[in-house]
């Protein structure tokens, strides 16, 4: 049984070799090009789909079963697991952050100041819909940051408050410098 994506490359090659098939033969029988199978076996594939795996495994005589695993519950993380250091929370003690009370603040700060590790943490603990909700309602994201995340999530720029035409004028009233 394949338990993680990282093991798939191993099992595809092992099962193919056990079936005494070359990559070319597997490609012909499954309807997938040989170079794709080669890249898959070397772990160089980024766009792997369930349908492709089903084709490959059925030719090899195996049925693909997907066993969902439970996502980490929000209340199970410890505040110290937030991988943001001074980059996101220079002005507060991050041990005091709690979900869901500080969800908006946490998401906003990581979107604005977080590095790759912080963003990966965010995506593993916070649902995409909640992140998009914060992006749409935030008044504290810079235009550059808001533009980036709007493009990333593929959402309409008009639905993002800090990108609206009226918002920068309101910001000038508050902060003139």
Image (tube, rainbow, N blue to C red):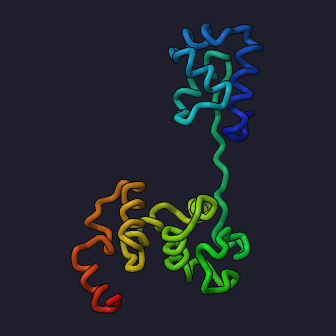
Which residue, as the protein is rendered here, is positioned at the far left? 165
Which part of the image, by quadrant, shows the C terminus? Answer: bottom left
Between 65 and 44, the one nearer to me in the picture:
44
Which residue, as the protein is rendered here, is positioned at the far front? 177
Between 128 and 62, the one nearer to me in the picture:
128
Residue 100 image-quadrant placement: bottom right
- Vertical placement of residue 25 versus 109, above or below: above
Residue 132 locus on image (x, y percent): 42, 65
Total numbered circles: 0
Q: Which residue is depicted at the point 42% across and 61% down? A: 149
Residue 47 vs residue 158: left or right? right
Q: Which residue is depicted at the point 32% across and 69% down? A: 160
Residue 84 image-quadrant placement: bottom right
Residue 153 locus on image (x, y percent): 41, 56
Q: Which residue is depicted at the point 64% across and 22% down? A: 57
- Vertical placement of residue 154 versus 147, above or below: above
Residue 71 locus on image (x, y percent): 64, 58
Residue 96 locus on image (x, y percent): 67, 85
- Vertical placement of residue 125 versus 108, above or below: above
Q: Which residue is depicted at the point 64% across and 34% down? A: 65
Which part of the image, by quadrant, shows the N terminus? Answer: top right
């Amino acid at each position: 049984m394949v338990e993680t994506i990282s093991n798939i490359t191993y099992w595809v090659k092992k099962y193919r070799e056990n079936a005494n098939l070359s990559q070319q033969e597997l490609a012909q029988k499954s309807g997938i090009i040989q170079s794709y199978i080669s890249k898959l076996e070397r772990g160089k594939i980024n766009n792997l789909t369930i349908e492709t795996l089903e084709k490959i495994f059925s030719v090899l005589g195996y049925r693909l079963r997907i066993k969902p695993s439970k996502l980490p519950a929000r209340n199970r993380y410890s505040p110290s697991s937030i991988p943001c250091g001074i980059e996101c929370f220079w002005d507060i003690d991050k041990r005091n952050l709690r979900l869901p009370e500080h969800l908006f603040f946490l998401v906003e700060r990581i979107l604005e100041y977080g590095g790759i590790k912080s963003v990966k943490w965010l995506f593993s603990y916070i649902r995409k819909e909640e992140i998009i909700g914060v992006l749409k309602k935030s008044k504290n994201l810079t235009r550059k940051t808001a533009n980036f995340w709007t493009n990333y999530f593929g959402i309409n720029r008009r639905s993002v408050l800090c990108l609206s035409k009226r918002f920068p004028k309101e910001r000038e009233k508050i902060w003139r410098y």
